[in-house]
Image (cartoon, rainbow, N blue to C red):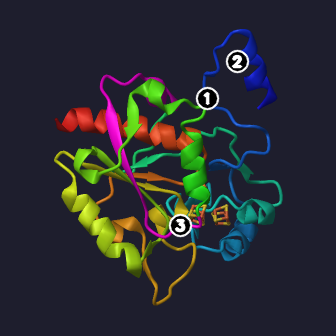
Amino acid sequence: MFKVIERLLGDKIATEKISLTGSERFRGKITGSCPENLREECAKACPVGAFQVTADAQGYAVDYKKCLFCGKCVEKAMGSLQHSSDEALPVITEDAAEVTAEVIKQKLGRSLHVRHLDAGSCNACDFEMGAMSNPIYDLHRYGVHVDASPRHADLLMVTGVVTRNLEQALRMSYEAMPEPRLVMACGACAAGGETYGASYAIVGAADKVVPVDIYIPGCPPRPSAMIAGLLAAADMLAERM
Ligand code: SF4
Ligand code: SF4
């Protein structure tokens, strides 16, 4: 923060280039091979069932739509698994292809209007969303704007696990949007739906209610991961027009 203030007073330019590499402590995608004797332990340690044992040499597959990036599986693997510090990854599109850093770096050719709906979040995802507009991330430089109404939006950004109280609001927001429209499920609650388990008050992941085009893993995701998803969305929208 002090660096930003210092630069504002000096050069009067606050916007920074977004680094796609996180700090050493950042927990990104899980890498490495899991030893055969520890695979079951790692899977048992996962609180949301995202870590699945496989028979290949790597020994596991992670469902990043559910993963909380809590690090429990990495701890159990006794140094064989690591979290990557590449903070922009993974972003998952509807056909399960991961968006690469190269794609993320491409500039937008058009604007993207976003309507946000909190379907039942703890608000941490929403705070990170707010950070996209600060001088560090400066979302507007990409031509992305947050709208007050779904009627003007290209993309519906959903945070939080969908609760019974907000299920109808989510459906109605989607139906109010003009075509072509996209939906982005932002964070482990909206993308995976397992964070709070099952209850009478919970419907689940956003794709139980509306079709989802882009999933942003993380609990909460970093602003750069959200921006990466929005840039991927703008590309998808351009293809559909
Ligand atoms: S980091 Fe992800 S996959 Fe590993 S235990 Fe936590 S939630 Fe499960
Ligand atoms: S994904 Fe995590 S941070 Fe986001 S709303 Fe759910 S519990 Fe909160």
Image marks 2 and 1: residues in contact by CB distance under 8 Å:
yes
Quadrant where the image shows the C terminus: top left
Tell me if residue 139 comes above or below residue 10 in the rendering: below
Q: Residue 210's spot in the image, x, y percent?
A: 28, 65
- Element carrying mark 1: loop
Q: Residue 195's spot in the image, x, y percent?
A: 57, 72
* Side (left or right) of 29 relative to 105: right
Whether disc 3's CB lies below 8 Å from ligand 2 is answered: yes
Which numbered disc, 2 or 1, marks the residue closer to the eye? 2
Mark 2 vs mark 1, CA separation in Å: 10 Å
Tell me if residue 175 comes above or below residue 41 in the rendering: above
Q: What residue type is labelled 2?
A: Leu
Q: Residue at x 40, y 34 (%)?
A: 144
Which numbered disc, 1 or 3, marks the residue closer to the eye? 1
Q: Does the magenta stretch include residue 100?
A: no
Q: Is residue 113 magenta?
A: yes
Q: Give the range drawn in magenta.
A: 101-122
Q: What residue type is labelled 1?
A: Pro
Q: Name the residue under label 1.
A: 135
- Element carrying mark 3: loop
Labels 2 and 1: the sequence-earlier one: 2
Quarter of image, res 18: top right
Q: What residue type is labelled 3?
A: Ser
Q: Name the residue under label 2.
A: 8
